[in-house]
Image (cartoon, helix red, strand yellow):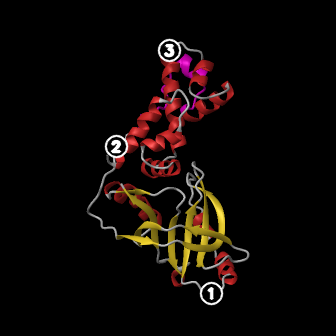
Amino acid sequence: MDWTTRMNLALDYIEANLEGEIDFKQAAKMAFCSQSNFSNMFLIAAGIPISEYIRRRRLSLAALELQNGEAKIIDIALKYGYSSPTAFNRAFQNQHKVPPQYARSRKVPLITYPRISLQINLKGDTEMKVRIERKPAFTTAGIKKAFRNDSTENLIPEFWTKENLDKIKALSNSEPREFFGLCADFDGAHEFDYYIAVATTAAVSGLETYEVPAATWAILEKDGDLMELAGRFWKEWLPSSGYRRADENIPDVEVYPEFGLLKPDYEYELWFPVVKL
């Protein structure tokens, strides 16, 4: 069963439960991945968070029932997960630009979103430099900050300041050859911790320690924009590779040689933990 088939089975489950409670662990299980990986893969493939997709679909179905049925507005609101008329009215106006009462009485055109069916266009005309490598566990020390992966802005580059890098260098006992950016501790939704760190053999006072477990990694060498390359990993390489992303207790890793940091054309590698299907 390929990646798109598994993801679409999970979407079938979500679609069948739009009128009730959606168990995201069950959806992730149907996609053969963890809850956080399912959330991340959907966001990258569809371009919107899974929570936003569900909200749009529920309000689309609610609009159809509103204009083509006789159910009370409060009953429609409760059916699609809104505990109060005020919350439903606010969400309805945000999507459809008119209040529910107006939509029912005037039969105005409303904004609806169809069910997504994920189809991955696997391109073979653009190369990707990828190697599979098993690495032992290692310890890092650095500083961390919480981010969200459903934000409209990528705020992580602003975290890579000279001041933060100097702090890590000053508190470490050796001159690092590489810096690591660790995307770790996903909460099952959209929040995660991001570490700027260096490898270490012992805890360093003043820095956060993170243990990266032994794993098999798909390692992507620099190829243009980092975020675009990460997207190509999820949308192009992973679906056709015979691998899946490993469990969420292993971080995604960015690796930067010290000499190239903060330069416009910096060097990097992306490490994604993988296991064979």
Examine the rendered structure and indicate whether residue 212 appears above or below residue 198.
Answer: above
What amino acid is at disc 2? Thr
Please report the residue visible at 47 percent of the width from the left and 17 percent of the height from the top.
Answer: 68
**Splitting the image into 4 quarters, where does residue 230 fall?**
bottom left
Distance between mark 3 and mark 1 Cα atoms:
71 Å
Residue 113 at least partly seen: no
Q: Earlier in the sequence, mark 3 or mark 2?
A: 2
Mark 1: few, some, or many residues within 10 Å (few <14, many ≥20)? few
Residue located beneath label 1 in the image: 174
Examine the rendered structure and indicate whether residue 29 appears above or below residue 147.
Answer: above
Residue located beneath label 3 in the image: 69
Q: Nearer the viewer, residue 187 or 213?
A: 213
What amino acid is at disc 3? Gly
* Magenta-highlighted residues: 96-116
Q: Secondary structure at mark 1?
A: loop
Q: Are marks 3 and 2 in contact (CB under 8 Å)?
A: no
Q: Earlier in the sequence, mark 3 or mark 1?
A: 3
Residue located beneath label 2 in the image: 5
| Quarter of the image that includes the C terminus | bottom left
Please report the residue visible at 47 percent of the width from the left and 35 percent of the height from the top.
Answer: 14
Q: Nearer the viewer, residue 226 or 10?
A: 10
Q: Where does the image place residue 190, in percent across and percent down from the top left?
A: 58, 51
